[in-house]
Image: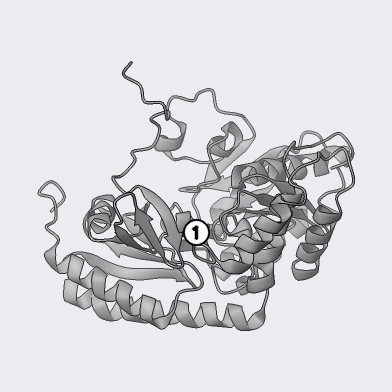
Amino acid sequence: MAITPLMPVYPRSPVRPVRGEGVYLYGEQGEKYLDFAAGIAVNILGHGHPHLTKAIQDQAATLMHVSNLYGSPQGEAFAKRLCDLTFADTVFFTNSGVEAIECAIKTARRYHYAKGNPHKHDLISFSNAFHGRSMAAVSATDQAKMIDGFAPLLPGFKVVPFDDLDAALAAIDDNTAGFLLEPIQGEGGIRPASHEFLAGLRAACDEHDLMLVFDEVQCGVARSGQLYAYQHYGVTPDIMASAKGIGGGFPMGACLAREKAAAGMVIGTHGSTYGGNPLAMAAGQAVFDIVADEEFLAEVRQKGERLRSALEQMIPNHDHLFDSVRGVGLMLGIKMKSESRAFVNYLRTRGLLTVAAGDNVMRVLPPLTITEEHIREFVEALSAAAAEYEVPAAAA
């Protein structure tokens, strides 16, 4: 049999972690890696954080799952906490980011349906976006690598250039339900939207009674140095998808919405077998015990500036390889002059874990708990690796 037991949809690297401790991962033979990928912005408290692991252990021994047919004191408590900390009035819990996106799309469309405007079902989305791998999520992007072979795509999406307000406004028509976007694109290359762009979208939504839907799956939950990235901009969405860091490594997500936006989400319109299970809620509460704190968020901002500064000081020493640093907080990207994916693969052989992204960017997404020593270790190791790296001939 030629196919592998694990469906071969990932180009899996030789890195095979079996244990994690803080900012480090360890392989089968004891190999040590400095993890500045954090499970692609998921392990925001690092590996084996005592408060998170104890909360999961205690809840697993108490109650893991019952069904959403019953009342959920655990879900009610975490939902209220999220609402108190954000713009939202109500929350639907999911198991992943793409499920949160699906709920967000349905919420936006159902809002117009409930108002007697079922023709308003199209969402304007943006180039180089990544919203997940479901059929709706890939239909909302223009990336060939995401959509090739999956035709016919779902109708109801119109893709325009990112951070181009004129193009976004020109795309509005009588069928428009709203806008769907990442305020800081992750997979697309760590590209923060401009304030003018987001403010313009908010104004258009207010003028035309449209839904502003933010995908904060990657940039949310303290990653940017604010609890959610929209708080940097002072631009509030109507609906928001959250996941990745929200469980600190436990699979979960959430769709947050204003009361107005969720007006159509009544009994029977949406559901999930596992979403909001007590074990997930315990994980989420434990994560927020730590990150929903202004002192912690200030430290993330400070560490982000320290890491950015150190990278910017390093770049001139390797200006054949690196171009510039971009991003917010501890969601940083290094724009490269050679193929970023090849360099990311090379760093793995040197014990450094980062993540490739679009626009020839290497993402730097460490746990939010890193220290000054970890920053120094990363930058020194990155500089040493860059000095020895030979750019592949085809990319030179």
Q: Residue at the spot x=39%, y=59% of the render?
A: 25
379 w.r.t. 53: above or below: below
Residue 56 image position (x, y, % from top left): 66, 56
Q: Residue lying at the far front in this picture: please name it.
A: 61
Q: What residue is disc 1 on?
A: 41
**Residue 3 falls in which quadrant of the image?**
top left
Q: Is residue 229 visible?
A: no
Q: Residue at the spot x=55%, y=35% of the render?
A: 139
Q: Is residue 223 visible?
A: yes
Q: Quadrant of the N terminus?
A: top left
Residue 134 image position (x, y, % from top left): 57, 35
Q: Residues within 10 Å of mark 1 (few under 14, many from 20)?
A: many
Q: Quadrant of the C terminus?
A: bottom left
Q: Residue lying at the far top in this picture: please name it.
A: 1
Residue 184 image position (x, y, % from top left): 52, 61
**Residue 19 falls in which quadrant of the image?**
bottom left
Front residue (pair 105, 276): 276
Q: Residue at the spot x=58%, y=46% of the render?
A: 125
Front residue (pair 9, 324): 9
Provide the secondary structure element on which disc 1 rests: helix
The residue under label 1 is which amino acid type? Ala
- Position of 118 with respect to 394 (left or right) is right
Front residue (pair 341, 108): 341
**Residue 145 falls in which quadrant of the image?**
top left
90 w.r.t. 68: above or below: below
24 w.r.t. 280: above or below: below
Residue 340 image position (x, y, % from top left): 28, 54
Its colouring scheme is one colour
- Position of 6 with respect to 95 (left or right) is left
- How many numbered circles does the render carry? 1
